[in-house]
Image (spheres, coloured by chain):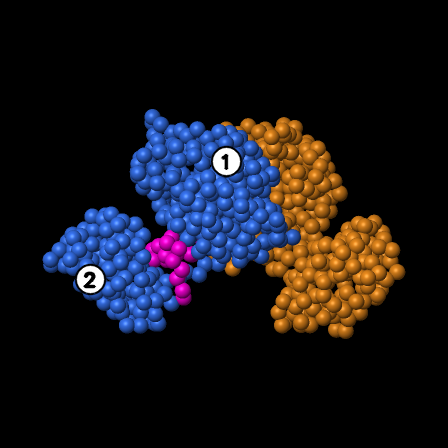
Chain colours: A orange, B blue
Amino acid sequence: MGVPATPYAGSTMTFDLATLVQPSTSKILLVVLDGLAGYATADRGTELEEADTPNLDELAAAGSTGLLDPVGPGITPGSGPAHLSLFGYDPFDYHLGRGALSAAGLDVHLDPGDVAARGNLATIDGEGLITDRRAGRLPDLEALEVVRLLNAGVSIPDVDVVFVHEAQHRVLVVLRGNDLDPHVDDTDPQMTGVPPLTPMAQTRAATHTAEVVAEIDRQARAILADQPRANALLLRGLDSQRQLPTVQERYGLRAAAIAVYPMYRGIGRLVGMDPVGPPATIDEQVVLLKEHWDNYDLFFFHHKPSDSAGEDGNFETKVAAIEALDAVVPQLMAMSPDVVAVTGDHATPSQMAAHSWHPVPVLLHGEQVGRDQVTGFGERHCLHGALGRRPARELMPIMLNVAGRLAKYGA
Amino acid sequence: MGVPATPYAGSTMTFDLATLVQPSTSKILLVVLDGLAGYATADRGTELEEADTPNLDELAAAGSTGLLDPVGPGITPGSGPAHLSLFGYDPFDYHLGRGALSAAGLDVHLDPGDVAARGNLATIDGEGLITDRRAGRLPDLEALEVVRLLNAGVSIPDVDVVFVHEAQHRVLVVLRGNDLDPHVDDTDPQMTGVPPLTPMAQTRAATHTAEVVAEIDRQARAILADQPRANALLLRGLDSQRQLPTVQERYGLRAAAIAVYPMYRGIGRLVGMDPVGPPATIDEQVVLLKEHWDNYDLFFFHHKPSDSAGEDGNFETKVAAIEALDAVVPQLMAMSPDVVAVTGDHATPSQMAAHSWHPVPVLLHGEQVGRDQVTGFGERHCLHGALGRRPARELMPIMLNVAGRLAKYGA
């Protein structure tokens, strides 16, 4: 039994926002510092509070601030649902499996009927027990060779199996054929010292797919038997194509995703954004923003290093990553966007070295936003902001309105 | 396409939280000061604000605080829904009838098929009109004798009728037999000067039960004809056993209810908690907590005196009741719980001498909670807390997450 579905009396949005959308030439800039939020302890503020961010502080002072709950109370979000919320999509309505996310991130287009999974190249010992779920995070060149062997060797009757290398041990696996169904449990047990799991069908319709996955597991072990470390393949997050309404359909926005990491270009593409570039650095991201300024209405500017540093448990590196974003703010503002929001997709406190449930600070800047009394950009500053505390998916309607893109509701 | 019809993300959970629950050895302590909240006036703070609570203040300073709305905006909750909210159950989905609550509170176990009702011993005049719905709030000893007469005298073919005295005029009535159905209207008209209502079946299936209730009414009047004031019985809230999903099923928690008052042990039992003890004092509650520390994951520690004092309209006694809880906080913290929440189930402002709709302060303490800037535990302090203001039922998912018991949502 789970928590049942009921709205909170105070605050539902049960109408079609698209009915209010009106045309505009305004420009919206959404800057996402991945994993931005943290938490304070007795001896130290959060990473954002400790960072020296004069430019973000100035925006916060001139605009309004608040705190966003990415997905729901007490819920630690993955990257997919966290970004969908920022794009205004209810992440409970639009669930993205790992396979679909990985495919999107690699720009691999899934057709209806395809099944995709996230794969880990892994190491098993002589008794078939997993000794390293990531095969020592093997170098890309070594992994590419392993992936080539898998593509050449794995053969299943009536099913095309394609392996696409992501980075290090990470591989996307796509199955294409008739009667495939993604409702198959992971083979990745998420621990070492045990064998890979036998793939189990969750539904009768997935029986065939479970057999295919089992056969891939057998063939992969045979093909990789002589590999020094990548001698097995663990699969998780089997998923199929996800068709989401686009930001053009929902908000009338032509949108560009400007992200260094493929995953975030992919998430943008899932909601109809054009991934421009790809850029390799934040400076190239700024160049792309300028180049494409006239072509789009919404710019999703994604900054990954804050999350990576948080995941590594490195407070100082996360502070530096936030400061690196602050340093380009003047160049972003030089484009004179009508609305700027700066926020995170979720918290990645360096104390936890992981995503967390904590709320995320947000600042909103634009001519008609109005000023609150907050003069700095930080978690505890934003507690007192005029935007209050709200679900992350409420940010997009507010940005649209400040951008002059929503008509009045009712007479 | 527009924004789909979905409830407010901050407060709804349209998915099954149980799918995120993961095992842990962490300990969660939920301390409920019944009726904790109050309201400030020009000359005086709330009872909690005026109380001297150094230990709770210290927890508030080291953790995060906020305000909870027990059931919904502007709604004054009863004890049942108020506690269900704190346990993470939407009180609109899980309605508890008066009969089921009374049975739970008296530790009377209802079997499937049983029907329970709350009864009032009442006074009727020679023409059968009600003159006092509470029989002068007769003393317990007098009421117990009346209840003994009813148990000895009332006899219905094929239906066991059991009367259990609660306090003063209040009686629980349990019917046990075949083909019973609780869909029968009250016989209590909730006013004087009129006769008791004829029990009406709301459905065809309840016709037999309505006849049984009518026969109980007739026999009770005959048996009690010579009583000086308790010469009739009014029934309301006919109800059957409520099977709620347990906290074990929903959250994977083995839970203990540590409460002096039977009603709260009963509410705990309704959600699968083990009522330990019973304790007679707060010191015995502390002893029970220590004794059972290794056996449970969640401890519901209930403190009644704050509500009783509020109901009596006694400000100073309520202050003292809060201070009495504060005094045992060091012993509670000595158990090193991973997560502690201290809150109330609802407000009982002593100015009103009744439950009210006002929000309830909450403090959350644990290693990964993070600190806000609030340094004391009080209604107006908690307004500035990092937990913000939210429905009470959002507390449990947050506690679960801080306790390491919820996996990440989505990839």
Q: Is residue A188 visible?
A: yes
Magenta span = B90-112
Who's the residue at 50% across and 45% down the image? B288
- Which residue is at the far top? B43
Q: From this view, report whether residue B391 is shown above or below residue B103.
A: above
Residue B351 in percent (x, y) is at: 31, 35
User: Residue A288 vs residue B95: left or right?
Assistant: right
Which image quadrant is residue B391 in? top left
Disc 1 residue type (three-letter): Val
Disc 2 residue type (three-letter): Ile
- The rendered magenta stretch, by its main secondary structure, is classed as loop
Who's the residue at 76% across and 56% down the image? A193
Residue B92: say if magenta.
yes
Q: Is residue A295 visible?
A: no
Q: Secondary structure at mark 1?
A: helix
Disc 2 or 1, which lies upstream in sequence? 2
Q: Which residue is mark 1?
A: B329
